Amino acid sequence: MGKLEPPLQVNHMPRTSKSNANDPEKEETANTSMQVTQTMQAQAVQTQTMQRSSPPNHIFVGKKPVMSYAMSALIQLTQAGEIVVKARGMAISRAVDVAEIVTKRLGNGAFSVKDIRIGTEVVGEGSETRNVSSIEIVVGK
C-alpha cells in the first residue's frame, strides 16, 4: 500500500477590494484583529511551555483507580528506572497501594521501595490555612 499524505491546510486571507483599500476604519479593524491573533498565539506558546513543572518520573496520586496509577508507574519505571509516588491527605493510602502493586504484583520482584518521606503541607491562605499530610514513596530497581 502507498503511504497516505496528510491533507494540505490552506489559510485564506480575505481580499480587500480597491474601494476598501484606503478606508482607515477597515484598516484599523484589520490591525486590531492581527494584534489579537498575535496575543492569542503568544499565550498558547506560554501555556505549552508552562504545562509540566514537575519531573516526568513523579506520579501524583489522586482520585483515579489504583491500577491506572500502577500502570503509569510501571511504564515510567521501565523508562527511567526510578519513580516517586506522591500523595496528600486521603490519597495517601492509594499511593501506598500503588507502590505495593508495582513492587509485589506487577514488577515480579524486579522493583523495591527505596525511600519513604512523610511530611505536612500548609494549604490555604489567611485564616483558611490547614495542615495536610503528604507522602513520597521512591520506587526503583
Image: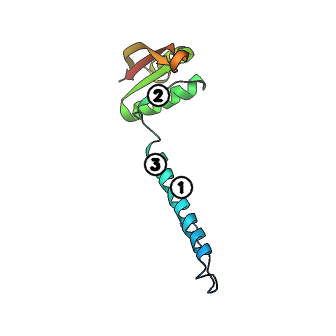
| Amino acid under disc 1 | Met
Question: Pointers 3 and 2 in contact (CB under 8 A)?
Answer: no
Q: Amino acid at mark 3?
A: Gln
The amino acid sitting under disc 2 is Ile
Q: Residue at the far bottom: name it.
A: 18
Q: Secondary structure at mark 2?
A: strand
Label 2 Cα crowd, 10 Å radius (few <14 / some 14-19 / many 20+)? many
User: Which of the 4 image quadrants contains residue 12?
Assistant: bottom right
Q: Residue at x 51, y 25 (%)?
A: 70
Query: Looking at the image, which residue is at 51% across and 21% down?
Result: 125
In which quadrant will I find the C terminus? Answer: top left
| Residue 79 placement: quadrant | top left
Rendered location of residue 5, percent (x, y): 55, 67
Q: Position of residue 50 (x, y in %)?
A: 45, 42
Determine contact: label 3, label 1, CB under 8 Å: no
Residue 8 shows in this picture:
no
Sequence-earlier tag: 3 or 1:
1
Judging by the rendered image, the residue that carries numbered circle 3 is 46
Would residue 26 be found to the left or right of residue 79 on screen?
A: right
3D distance between C-alphas at marks 2 and 1:
31 Å
Residue of label 2: 59
Mark 3 and mark 2: span between their CA atoms? 24 Å
Tag of residue 40: 1
Of residues 5 and 45, the one nearer the viewer is 45
Nearer to us: label 3 or label 2: 3
Q: How far separated are the C-alphas under marks 3 and 1?
A: 10 Å
